[in-house]
Image: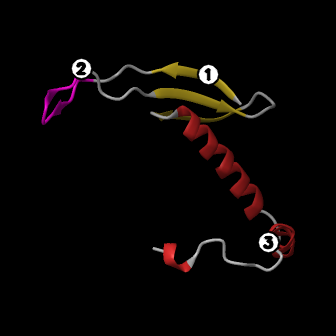
């Protein structure tokens, strides 16, 4: 849940190879909170929607890291019973 979002200014103009730009990137300052009304995080981003999704993913990651190994394995079995690798080897870095 977002408690406060403040739109930042565009920032100073930047020079490019085509001359000076009128505007630099826009950014947002936000205060993210839990459902109980407690502030959890303050941050700045140029993509508010993406950043909120990242916060949800990080919260889920922290929750899963707190689980015991057997509980994690059970979750994987319900989603991927054969424990197949979801990333083809050709796409690995």
Between the C-alphas of marks 3 and 1, the distance is: 39 Å
Q: Which residue is mark 2?
A: 22
What element does badge 2 sit on?
A: loop
**In the drawing, does residue 36 fall left or right of residue 23?**
right
Please tell me which of labels 2 and 1 falls first in the chain. 1
Asked if residue 27 lies in the magenta stretch, the reply is no
Foreground: disc 3 or disc 2 = 3
Q: Which residue is mark 3?
A: 80
Earlier residue among tags 3 and 2: 2
Secondary structure predominantly adopted by residues drawn in magenta = loop
Whether 16 is among the magenta residues is yes
Left or right: 11, with 18 as reference point: right
- Whole-angstrom CA distance, mark 3 to mark 2, is 50 Å
The segment highlighted magenta reads: 12-22
How packed mark 1 is, by other alpha carbons closer than 10 Å (few <14, some 14-19, many 20 or more), is: few
- Write the residue at 72% across / 78% down: 84
Q: Position of residue 63 (x, y in %)?
A: 76, 56
For the residue labelled by badge 3, is the local secondary structure a helix, a strand or a loop?
loop
Residue position for label 1? 4
Quadrant assignment for the C terminus: bottom left
Nearer to us of marks 3 and 1 is: 3
The structure residue drawn at horizontal position 74% and vertical position 31%, both measured from the top left corner, is 38
């Amino acid at each position: 849940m977002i408690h406060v979002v403040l739109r930042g200014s565009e920032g100073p103009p930047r020079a490019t190879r085509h001359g000076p730009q009128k505007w630099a990137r826009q950014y947002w300052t936000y205060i993210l909170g839990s459902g109980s009304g407690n502030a959890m995080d303050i941050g700045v981003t140029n993509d508010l929607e993406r950043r909120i999704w990242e916060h949800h993913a990080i919260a889920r990651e922290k929750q899963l890291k707190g689980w015991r190994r057997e509980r994690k394995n059970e979750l994987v079995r319900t989603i991927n019973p054969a424990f197949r690798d979801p990333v083809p080897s050709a796409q690995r870095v």
